[in-house]
Amino acid sequence: MHKLRLLLGICLLSISCAQAAIDPGLLRPLAADDSDTRIAAILALVEAAPEEAQPVLQAMAGDSLAVAGERVVVLGAGGRVFDAASNRELTPPPAGIETIGINNRVRRELASALAALRLFSAEREVRWQAAQEVNQNVDAKMLPLLDRALAAEKDPKIRARLQLAHAQASLGSTDAAVRLAAVKTLGESSDPRVRQLLLPLTEKQGDTWVEADSAVRAAAGTSIRSIEQRLAWADNLGRAFTGLSLGSILLLAALGLAITYGVMGVINMAHGELLMVGAYSAWAMQSVFRAHLPGALDWYLLAAIPVGFLSAALVGVLMERIVIRHLYGRPLETLLATWGISLFLMQVARTLFGAQNVEVANPSWMAGGIELLPNLMLPWNRIIIVAFSIAVLVAMWAILNLSRLGMFVRAVTQNRPMAGCVGVPTGRVDTLAFGLGAGIAGLGGVALSQIANVGPDMGQGYIVDSFMVVVLGGVGQLAGAVWAALGLGVFTKFLEGWTGAVVAKIVVLVLIIVFIQKRPQGLFALKGRFVES
Amino acid sequence: MSPSPARTPFIVRLGQSFDARSWWLVGLFAAFAVIAVPIMHLVLPADHPLHLSTWFITLVGKILCYAIVAVAMDLIWGYGGILSLGHGLFFALGGYGFGMYLMRQIGRDGSYQSDLPDFMVFLDWKELPWFWIGSDSFLWAVLLVLVVPALIAFVFGYFAFRSRIKGVYFSIITQALTYAAMLLFFRNETGFGGNNGFTDFKRILGYPITAPETRVVLFALSALALIGTLLLARYLVGSKFGRVLTAIRDSESRVMFIGYNPLWYKLFVWTLSAMLCAVAGALYVPQVGIINPSEMSVGNSIEIAIWVAVGGRGTLIGPVIGAFLVNLAKSWFTVSFPEYWLFFLGTLFIVATLYLPQGVVGLWARLRAGRRRGEGAAAGTTTAAAAKGAGA
């Protein structure tokens, strides 16, 4: 229905175009000999008849505007000739047709005039494009046109752009008062480009100021400062967000470890490889979907979540059954044995999938982002990962605190012999709990596949970070891991702002080492007295 | 405690820590390294069946350095019960310390013909950073190798042991320390050649570094350093200090209740172990011809632990055997079946921890004990009964 009405509107518009006539006196100067007259004519034409001018200007840009005597004509396809003023076909075609040639300067003016004309288009997308184009190349001559466009425009985003362009155009005005008003308006922007625009006004070129009027200069200074303030604010906000997203990645990587190490006390150096299993599951699901369900390729990630969980959990259960269960109570040996497992798994991945990284594409619904401010864009994939880590955290909390398995796990952690005495199958609980931790690592891997490289060595990069999170948070505590991960993420990102990524990482590691010396039990220690083993 | 009237000199006590049979073995080994190897490498023609190739000298020389590291690791882990995942750091620091000297020895023979090492010219540095001062002196390099890792180990260990960080916690933070150091050394701005590290050495003390004679000398030095390390370790382990250290390993709380402060015992053995690693690193670099930050990778330090575990913790010959077995296997695998090496190493980690708690040495002892028991069974049950009676 809506589309139909739009179509009808366009038809009506074209009919009215065909009938309305332009004053031929406005058209004649388009064929003048010097460029200045032509440019003035273009602007005058746009001014006088914005709607009718478009086909004529388009024809001019396409080199099919011509003069025949005193009459300006448009050359159509198949040798047909139309009168530019009335848009009526001329039969027979007049004699002595001469095409109006245009140079680059005129062409540029023509392009910006056409863009300005598109500001009045009925379609929002076209207007948005046009507003952006106008911003690129704007001068004082377009002010009346922009005024008109502003009066008609309802969309706030386009309006903001137009206002910007308007102020930008006014900066070129010869009237100091107009310039002052423009500088003040621009001060309300939070666009880094506007800052670039204003900066020259406060500078000297040689001995003379670029901006002659001192009041305008002062206002420009104030405007720049307020823009910078807003930019800094947005920067910090952006940094906090990337910190949050890094924190949630750390959390996803460390949550599985919080169960296996934090709760069960098993040092699992193969944890990074469990992440890798999850990431490769995402890749495998992508390949399966590509081969068999190309239509639903965008949704492979949803299938990868259970697959990633189950395959990593399976690997975890096998690890526990074959190796780890024989080493309970010997943490250092567990460390070495699981390191062996990690080497083994890495080589398995290399043999099965090749030594090169595999390519895992983001589904299309994760592309793009929300533009909060002109210089602050929150990408969808980061937002989704933050949300996903929250979901995994909630699920894990629920399993540990509400389910029967969780109760058993807590019981075995607190007092293994007593739990066994009252009938908890401690051996099976160990296996299941380890499987759960491994499965959560697999989920982390699925998420990581969306933002990091997927390859046989990927796990190695996370192992130190994950342990740092768990150790910093305090063993045996989920809350500790959460605070530690988020804190580390945000802190690292802010530090990166002034030291660079590598130094920030080194500083963070050293700070953690120092912190552990002060508080060996981590941020959140279990209350109560424990016998040291 | 009454003061003993005339203490035997330290050097004598050191000598006494090996029994006669051990001295024989050590002497044999030293003679092989110092006399036989040079003859077999330098004098015998290349087609002679007993000729030792450069490849062999480099490989075994390298493994000798690894063996020193393994013994150092065994002191702290096998006797002190502290698993360090930071020994790769001390090894690399020793290597870098000596590498600085080797870099300065290149002089103007680098590809940029500058007084500065090539990587600094590449970074457009105009003068040496302050920590390179004195690096053109051999003695200073030796001092650097001994002091810097020891200092780092001492400070780190002091704070860690004072907070009574132990077990896995200690392993993890040493790992983090090594990882942080690796990231630091990977940076070009740190002043140690970034990810390329130091390489293209030309000479050492003025002698060309790739000459067969130099190689043979370095080989002999490594062998002597290993013997020295073993001697020192044997002495320490047999002394009262060693007894307390082992007691701390087995039950730290009990040792504290008796009145010892474990801090200094642990700190001493930890610092000593770091120094030994650094010496090994300094001997390793001229033989291998390169040092770069990947020596500090997480995996390298854990691999040191597996040499010790395979050979046998808590024995001194075990780590040496382990270092040789694992590294010979590595050089064979990486040439013949490169894709299976990690499978083998991974399996080795698992098998060694699950089935070889005492390593190869323990296995050997068990087999021998089993055979003796078998002989005993053949001789009749009387001995066992007699032993029982004697025990009761």
Image: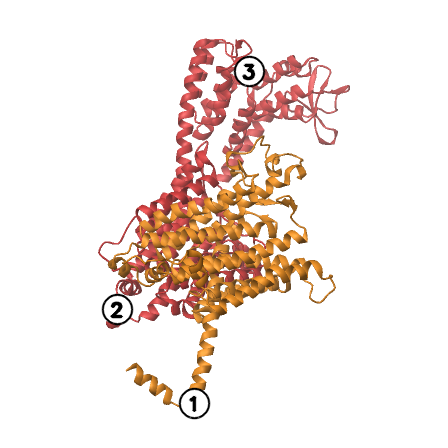
Chain colours: A red, B orange
Q: Is residue A421 left or right of residue A385?
A: left
Pick out the residue farthest to the left.
A528
Pick out the residue farthest to the right.
A96
| Residue behind mark 2 | A419
| Residue behind mark 1 | B379
Residue type for callout 1: Ala
Q: Is there any visible trace of residue A483 in the rendered image?
A: no
Few, some or many residues within 10 Å of mark 3 (<14, 14–19, 20+): some
SS at circle 3? helix
In the rendered view, tell whether residue B101 sits above or below residue B346: above
| Residue behind mark 3 | A141
In the rendering, at what x and y percent does residue A507 appear? 42, 41
Q: Which dot marks residue A295?
A: none
Q: Is there any visible trace of residue A389 in the rendered image?
A: yes
- Mark whose residue sits in front, 1 or 3: 1
- Mark whose residue sits in front, 2 or 3: 2
Residue type for callout 3: Lys
The Cα–Cα distance between marks 1 and 2, rounded to whole angstroms, is 49 Å
